[in-house]
Amino acid sequence: MSSLTVIIPAYNEAGNIAETLAAVVPFIEKYFQDYEILVFDDCSKDDTGKIAESVAAQNPKIKVIHNPKNMGMGYNYKAGVKMARKDYVVMVPGDNDILEKTFDPLFQAVGEKDIILAYTADMSMRPWGRVILSKTFTGLMNLLFGLRLKYFNGIVVHRTDLVRSIAIETDSFAYQAEALVKLLRKGASYLELPQYIRERRYGSSKALGLRNIARVLKTIFRLWFKTFIDGKPVSSNIKM
């Protein structure tokens, strides 16, 4: 059995973080010989950090990192990948919107391909504005980069050494899309599986903020430019 690093970014998720941890830990322990969980309290204004520390006090495999200022989803993911000590790495959102039935097939499939990625099977739980934005983003990414993925922003399990082989430049919500474009264009293999979501029970999503959307668009343009215009295409040098 392999080992897994779980990265959980959390910004103002006091109502969700304990349930997120309670939901994912049993499935990690079921499928992995060893694991670590890195909770990034992204300078929350509520009790997210305190609650995460309380849960960590009961499980030595959980570590809580307190950012001195809000850094963004991409930053937290990159920091977690840098800190990771296990064979595989995955990000699980701290808002507890992933149903438990997602984790069984996802973690069971780890090792079958370089990358195991999830797509949202039922978008009806999302606000219509987010559904439109998500479908537009997916279609645009596939069109611009010659891919055929069902989704770019779901749970993704990477080989740790593989995701460390590329540079993720953005700190925005597009961090995983950037990683997938770079790795798939280098020849990484992947398997897509469904993920199932619930309505957010507490708080509100940060995905639809104008600042975030602007940063995502900037990331897409920069990635496209570097891939196709500046003469430095992504090379095929992955060790399988």
Image (cartoon, helix red, strand yellow):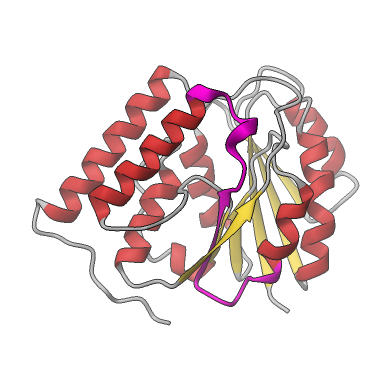
Is any part of residue 161 visible from this angle?
Answer: yes
From this view, report whether residue 191 is shown above or below residue 101. Answer: below
In the picture, which quadrant includes the C terminus?
A: bottom left
In the picture, which quadrant includes the N terminus?
A: bottom right
Report the span colored magenta: 108-129
* Residue lying furthest right: 58
Q: Is residue 141 left or right of residue 58?
A: left
**Percent x, y of residue 12:** 67, 23
Residue at 55 percent of width and 48 percent of height:
154
From this view, report whether residue 140 is shown above or below residue 168. Answer: above
**Percent x, y of residue 74:** 47, 41
The one of 60 and 108 positioned closer to us in this rendering: 108
The one of 140 and 157 positioned closer to us in this rendering: 140
Q: Is residue 35 part of the magenta span, yes or no?
A: no
**Percent x, y of residue 91:** 60, 50
* Residue lying furthest bottom: 240
Tally of numbered discs: 0
From this view, report whether residue 23 is shown above or below residue 54. Answer: below
Q: Which quadrant of the structure image shows residue 95? A: top right
Q: Is residue 229 left or right of residue 52?
A: left
Residue at 48 percent of width and 70 percent of height:
161
